[in-house]
Image: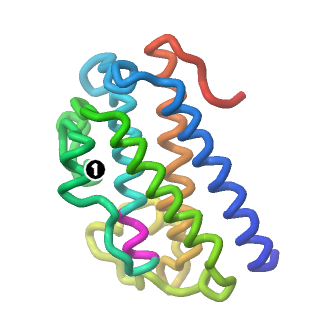
Amino acid sequence: MSDELILDSLRRRFRALFSLYEDATATMTLEQVNHREKARVMPIAFSLFHYVNMIDASMMMLTGELFLCNDEILDAINPGIRDHGKHKTVDEMDVQQIGNYEAFIDYMNKVFARIETWLATLKPEDLTRLVVPRPFGPQIINTFSARVAGPEGITVLDGVECWLYQHGMRHMGEIELSRAFVGLQGMTS
């Protein structure tokens, strides 16, 4: 498969993935997003904030650009926990809430637009650029991307597929399941 074909597929897959998040957020209320089924079951608010904030952070590793998220954005969103929760336990994060849903959706849309703009300008030769060389440190060693990585380490393509795409699909699955808890349907068949 050519690198051009891979890039075309990535661009189309991300537009499809992001459209699922856009449709999901457009069809849920803040109360539904913040619904807590029970302890140790993550609310939709966690899946949404975690994924968007993590892919915002991942872009720094892929592009060298700073986070979009800052104190002003966090103040506007007013999450219950001002952390994406990657290195926290379920017991610490199952209480995540979003305070201002419109501010969150605005942040989500900016992160998605940034990624799509970057993907549109990505060159085929950029896909093989090494972003995390082996040996991996403690923050990376037990991640899915470490399992995917080639002999040299994690490339741009590995990062895009693991940190951005696979991660988004995982959390969309959680959102689809959690929508049933609040009386909504899943997003896809």
Above or below, 94 against 1 in this view is: above
Q: Looking at numbered disc 1 in the image, what kind of residue is underneath it?
A: His
Say which element carries label 1. loop
Image quarter where the N terminus lies is bottom right
Residue 114 part of the magenta segment? no
Horizontally, residue 136 falls left or right of residue 164, namely left
**Mark 1 surroundings within 10 Å by alpha-carbon count, few (fewer than 14), some (14 through 19), many (20 or more):** many
Could you tell me residue 15's position as x and y percent? 65, 53
Q: Main secondary structure of the magenta part?
A: helix
Q: Residue at x 72, y 57 (%)?
A: 12
Image quarter where the C terminus lies is top right
Could you tell me residue 60's position as x and y percent? 37, 73
Q: Which residue is mark 1?
A: 84
Q: Residue at x 62, y 29 (%)?
A: 187
Could you tell me residue 48's position as x and y percent? 40, 40
The part of the image, by quadrant, that contains residue 59 is bottom left
How many callouts does the rendering have? 1
Q: Residue at x 27, y 42 (%)?
A: 77
Above or below, 35 against 11 in this view is: above
The part of the image, by quadrant, that contains residue 103 is top left
Above or below, 30 against 100 in this view is: above
Magenta-drawn segment: 57-62
**What's the coloring here?**
rainbow
Q: Residue at x 66, y 83 (%)?
A: 123
Residue 61 part of the magenta segment? yes
Could you tell me residue 19's position as x and y percent? 62, 43
